[in-house]
Image (cartoon, helix red, strand yellow):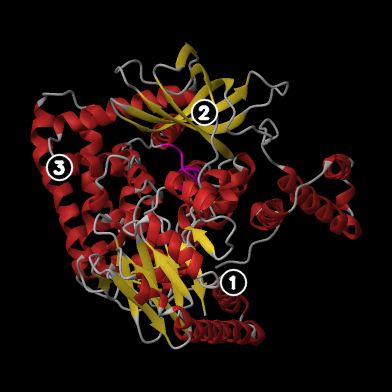
Amino acid sequence: MKKYFYRSYPFIRLIIPVLFGRVLSLFFTVSIYGIGVFILLFVFTFLFFFFKLENKYSRRWIFGLFINLTLLIGSWINTDFYLSYNVVYDQSQEYRATVVDVSRSNNRSQILEVLTINESSDSKKYFKSIIFYNNKNDQYSFVPGDQIVFYSSMHKIKAERNPYAFNYRDYLMSRCIVGQFYLDSTNCKYIKSNFTINRGFFSARNWCKEKIKMVIDDDNASSILIALLLGDKTLINKEVKSDFSGAGLMHIISISGMHIGIVYMLLLFLFGGVNSKKLKKFKLYVILSILWFYAALTGMSPSVFRSALMFSVLLIAQLKSNVSYNIYHSLAIAASLILLLSPGAIRNTGFWLSFLAVLSIVYFFPKINSLFHFSKPWNKFVWSLFSLSVSAQLGTAPLAIYSFKYFSTWFLISNLLIVPIVPFVLLGGLVLIISPVGSVVTYLIASPLKDATLFIIEIAEWVNGFYISKFSGLQFEWVDLLCIYLALVLYVAYNQYKRLILGVSSLSLFLLFMVINLTFTIIKRSKTILVVHEISNMSAVSFISSNSCFCFMDTCLSENIKDRSVMPLWRKFGKNTIDHEVDFEDKIIPVCSRDFKGVILNDNTNIEYIKSLKEQLDLVIVTDKVSVALATELVKYFNDVKIVFDSSFSKKKAIVLSGSLLGNNKMVQFVSLSGAYCVER
């Protein structure tokens, strides 16, 4: 790594105040005075630059200070000022909305992201919301740019109330979405359409999807091909998606830098013969146009934007031979633009994973790849793939483990088998899209393309079936994450400057991480945790202790619900699978450890027997198989014992019981009303 100077690659330094400002914006809101300070700093910075006051060496630090403070406060106050967060819930009012994006669409329903304005309110500010639209009569399906009016009430987005599970509300809030509507074709009126760039690309994307589904007759193969080409994963079967997740292949079906890189290499190959000086600019414009068109067609995610920008800078640098290309500088430019254009990106895990992957590959790949030298091209190719996969994981694995609570154990096998054929599948898919339906080209490539896509699916299923495909034994807290990345940064700095203090600091932080992680692991394994999960109209109780672990679950609980609501808890406590599932037909299930005693009542049973256990119990969990009469008697008798009614009691039934039958007994809790009940000792 070379030493980079401020004037040569300014964005490498300027990204630091931008990042710091975006982080501050997550915790502190800037008042009108902050905007005033930003304007003053901007004016002073402009004056320094305009009058060339920074040319004097003694004053350069002032100019640098002004630039950094201006960027810091500018990124801090950079929010969507046109949006309102002062909204009204659960009151029927008249709204007008413009469709911004369509998350999911079929013949019967759509999920729409809209900019909404309350026509009944004096405020004329828009707010973002989600519309779940039921197209009852197969009428007009909405597309971006459509304007609609409706009279309805906006509902709060339901928070995830199971411990450690993915919180969909927080995810939507990070995108400034504050509520949701449930509409159908009877209470929603279409007004007009406005052509937008997003509308054009949405229509093009739909046309491509329909063509792929028309030519590839297998649903699984077509859905994976659509995801690989266009980044739309909504059509993928849940089981197939789970296989890709467990096999560490989600980056294959999520449009990322790899896909943009493949398209870039294909374009360079196609235009490789154009080398004359007169046509160089034409070649540049054509490649850039196609590259950015494809990026926009796939939805322009942060990773796609970053990759397209990096390759654009590379192309321009190659055109002007006197300009040197630096990948770290292009990454800093891309990150700055994304953070300024999309303030919420700072909270997007995909944003961080994308940049960490590239940084890690750029730095570690040459070092790992040079460890062994092979004379045969095939061996060299396999080792390069191995080095590439390991390099990417060095930078992304800590954040992935922290965010998703597991690590794809066998990612190397799946990547070695799949990554080499992805360029051919991507190329075949692109040729399929631009070829006329029924042409010889379509006929020749459709069957091999389908077989290759099915092969990818089979490999993902095979690898996901390996022992402990999702390893949960290693868990990170935010302190662990901080120690790991600081240690990595110091290690890179040590290699750069060869200063002993940096190497010692890196090693010390790594050792600190090991001590902290080991301490947290010992504490977790010594704990007893019981969770009565909130799963609508179903029962699920997890019990994890040092000497006993089990899960009591409704037999109707699907694998998808289990993986979303129950497994995050088990993974958090280092369990790759549920150790033991209790038979749902059991009437009384004991929940006991050294310092905790409880019982699950799953049917009407002898009340006298239950009463005899009063002095021994800390907790009684009741399912809806217990009659109301027995439940009422239990509450009256166990007035000093915690009684939890699980989520098999519907919300409506829970409201009736809590109001009319149970009175003000504070020892009673309804999971359907208050969320998952958790005991940790």
Q: Which amino acid is tagged 3?
A: Leu
In 3D space, how far apart are the residues under numbered discs 2 and 1 (Cα atoms)? 37 Å
> Which residue occupies 55% across, 66% down?
667
> Which residue occupies 20% across, 62% down?
417
Left or right: residue 144 compared with residue 118: left
Residue 81 picture location, percent across and down: 70, 34
Q: Is residue 251 above or below residue 135?
A: below
Q: Nearer the viewer, residue 376 or 566?
A: 566
Residue 533 picture location, percent across and down: 42, 61
Q: Nearer the viewer, residue 368 or 374?
A: 368
Mark 2 or mark 1, which has the lower sequence index?
2
Quadrant (top left, top right, bottom left, bottom right) of the N terminus: bottom right
Numbered circle sitting on residue 482? 1
Residue indicated by mark 2: 114
Residue 109 picture location, percent across and down: 34, 28
Mark 2 or mark 3, which has the lower sequence index?
2
Q: Is residue 233 above or below residue 87?
A: below
Residue indicated by mark 3: 449
Residue 470 picture location, percent across and down: 31, 68
Q: Nearer the viewer, residue 313 or 33?
A: 33
Mark 1 or 3, which is nearer the eye?
Answer: 1
